[in-house]
Amino acid sequence: MEERVLEAMKEVLTTGQEMARRGLVAGSSGNCSVRVPDSDYIVITPTSQEYELMLQEDMCVVDSAGELVEGRYKPSVEINMHLAIYEARPEVGGIVHTHQTMATAVAIAGHSIPPILEEQVFTLLGAVELADHALPGTVELARNTVAALGNRNACLLAHHGVVAVGQKIRDALLNAEIVERAASIYIMSNILGGPKIVPFMT
Ligand SMILES: [Zn+2]
């Protein structure tokens, strides 16, 4: 297999395992992917496999139509969402989808995270909007996610979790961590009378 595909498989595996280690997902939940540079291929985590038990060769290589090109498992059920984001955002090279606790709590309450932290505004590029609910794996969820992301680097999924994107998958993972910090601070600041918006974002 081509070197750049192998490199993408390694990045997807290590990021998936890092998501689990950092508590952003549990068991086999969530997923992550990389767009293979200068190709029609995307590498994504397989469905229903525990991160800690995954091997590099378990990663799924799919084409831009979602057809499995290489791999012994089925790709993640959220493949539609990943493909839709890559199509809408040519600059995005990596995506992580997590079920992280604080951000999911915000999503379950039906909130988005307003632009409250400078770190959030500079890296995520503004508010973390809430995508309308649709069932996991559906084309409707893919569409709602693309709409909520806009040109920003993360969004919440109603009753579900978080999607974060970046030029590289390690940027996407960092962005997911920033969402979690912003969500925690958002919840805490509501106890203290409500957050204030970053001045230059008002
Ligand atoms: Zn999910």
Image (tube, grey):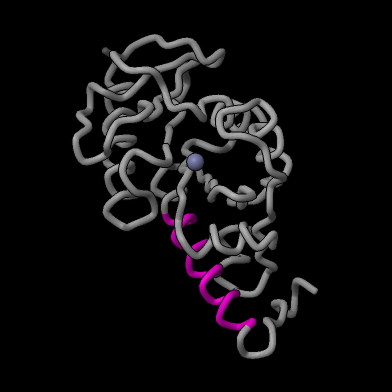
What is the quadrant of the C terminus in the image?
bottom right
**In magenta segment, residue 187:** yes
Q: Residue at x 34, y 38 (%)?
A: 28
Q: Nearer the viewer, residue 80 or 127?
A: 80
Q: In the image, is residue 198 above or below residue 165?
A: below
* Coordinates of residue 40 in the picture (x, y in percent): 50, 15
In the rendered view, does 190 fall on the left or right side of 54? Answer: right
Q: In the image, is residue 93 above or below residue 127?
A: above
Q: Residue at x 68, y 69 (%)?
A: 115
* Coordinates of residue 87 in the picture (x, y in percent): 63, 26
Q: Residue at x 48, y 26 (%)?
A: 77
Count of numbered badges drawn on the protein: 0
Q: Residue at x 69, y 68 (%)?
A: 114
Magenta stretch, residue numbers: 174-190
Q: Report if residue 105 is visible in the image.
A: yes
- Quarter of the image holding residue 72? top left
* Coordinates of residue 159 in the picture (x, y in percent): 60, 50
Q: In the image, is residue 190 above or below residue 3?
A: below
Q: Report if residue 150 is visible in the image.
A: no
Q: Nearer the viewer, residue 12 or 135?
A: 135
